[in-house]
Amino acid sequence: MSFVGDVLLDSWPISFVYDRIRAKQGWDGVYAYPFKKIKPSLEGVVFCNCEGPLTNQKPKPFADKDERSYFSVNPRFAKSLKQAGFDVVSLSNNHIKDCGTEGVLESVRSVASVRIEPVGAGANNQEARRPAFLERDGLKIAFLSYDLVNPKSVWADAQTPGAAHADAAGVSTDVTAARKNADIVVVNFHWGIEYRSDWDHPPPDASRVKIAHAAIDAGAQLVVGEHSHTVEKIEIYKHGLIAYGLGNFMFGAATREGHPESMILKARVNSQGLISYQVVPVLISPHKTRYQTVPLDGEAKAVFIRKLEKLSGLKNIGDSTLQPAASVPSTVTPTAVTITKTRSGI
C-alpha cells in the first residue's frame, strides 16, 4: 500500500504550466504531468487526500472560514488521479465545502466516476462516515476518513452534505464496525496546525495522540494524517503505525519553497495485520520541479531520512528492504503479500 498527503491539482499558479503542456500534448498530457515521474513508486493500493472540491461550482464564501483560500478543482482532474494509480481518495478536509454543498456532492460523484473509491464526504454525516471498502489479493481493506480542523461548517450533519467528523469515541465505533467486515482498517485524519516550513514544528498534541491511539485500540492497523503541509513524526503504537503528517504530495497552489520535500509511506499488510513499512522521500518544489512530484535521491534523500528518523525516534525507515514495525507480532509472515510495480501488491 502507498499513502501520500495533500493533492491539489488545479489552481492559478499551476495553470500556466498546464497551458503550455496542453498546447503541445492536449489534455492527456496535462493529466499525466503531475505524477509522471513518481507513478512507478505508487505501488499497491494507493491513497491520497484531495485538497479541494472536484466541481464546476464556483467558490461560495462562508462566515466561519478562518482563511482566505478557496479552492475549486475542475472535475476533469479526476482523470489525473486515475492515471496516476490512486485507488482511494479522501474528500474529508477543510476545503471540501469551498464551493458549497453541491460542490461536495459533485466531488463524490467525480471521484466515483473514474472508479476511484471516495471516502470521508457525503450527503450527510452518516454517509460521510461510511467506510470505503476495497478488495485486493484476497484481502478486504476498509478506509475511514475524518476532518478534525475548522471551519466546523464544513462538517456534515444529519441533513447537510459535508466532511465526516467524529470524536475519539465515534472513531472507535466506526473502526469496530468496519473491522467486522475487513481484514485491514486504515483511518485517515485531516488534522493539526498548518506550518510555514518543514522540520520546525512541535510533536502532535495530546488530542491527536488520543484519537490516533483510540483508532488503533479499536482495531485499525494504520492511521495516516495530513493538513500541516509538512512531514510529521511516525509512531509505532501496539500493533499499528501512525503517520501524523504525510505533508503535501502535489500542491498546485504553492508559490514558495516552504515545503520543498515530502514522502510516500509504503506499508505491507496481510490478513494478520501490518508486516512492514518504508518511507520514500520525494521532491515537490514548485521552483525546481515545476509542480511535478519526483523521487528525492542522493544526499538530499539521506538527510530527509535522518531528520524523520530523529523526529520519530525510529531507525531504518528508508530501508528499501521495508523494515518490520517494532511491535508487529512475530507470527506475521511477510510472504503473504508483496509490493511490486504491478497493481497486484497491497
Image (spheres, helix red, strand yellow):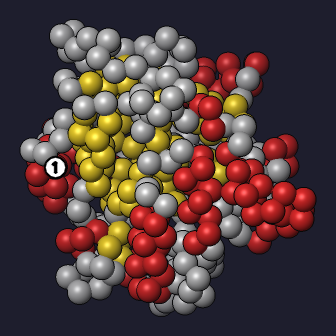
Q: Position of residue 187 (x, y in %)?
A: 30, 47
Q: Is residue 1 visible?
A: yes
Residue at 60%, 50% in the rendered image: 83
Q: Which residue, given by chain and number where applicable, does mark 1 sit on?
A: 178
Q: Position of residue 163 (x, y in %)?
A: 36, 71
Which amino acid lies under the numbered mark 1 shown in the image of this protein?
A: Ala
Q: Is residue 311 visible?
A: no
36 vs 175, nearest the viewer: 36
Q: Position of residue 209 (x, y in %)?
A: 30, 44
How many labels sit on residues? 1
Q: Is residue 152 left or right of residue 218?
A: right
Query: Picture quarter containing residue 324?
Result: top left
Residue at 23%, 39% in the rendered image: 140
**Image quadrant in which the C terminus is located:** top left
Mark 1 surroundings: few (<14), some (14-19) or many (≥20) residues within 10 A: many
Q: Is residue 36 left or right of residue 26?
A: left
Query: Picture quarter containing residue 149?
Result: bottom left
Q: Is residue 256 left or right of residue 338?
A: right
Please say if 58 is above or below 238: below
Q: Position of residue 188 (x, y in %)?
A: 36, 50
162 vs 55, nearest the viewer: 55
**Image quadrant in which the N terminus is located:** top left
Classify mark 1: helix, strand or loop.
helix
Query: Picture quarter containing residue 156?
Result: bottom left
Residue at 41%, 51% in the rendered image: 88
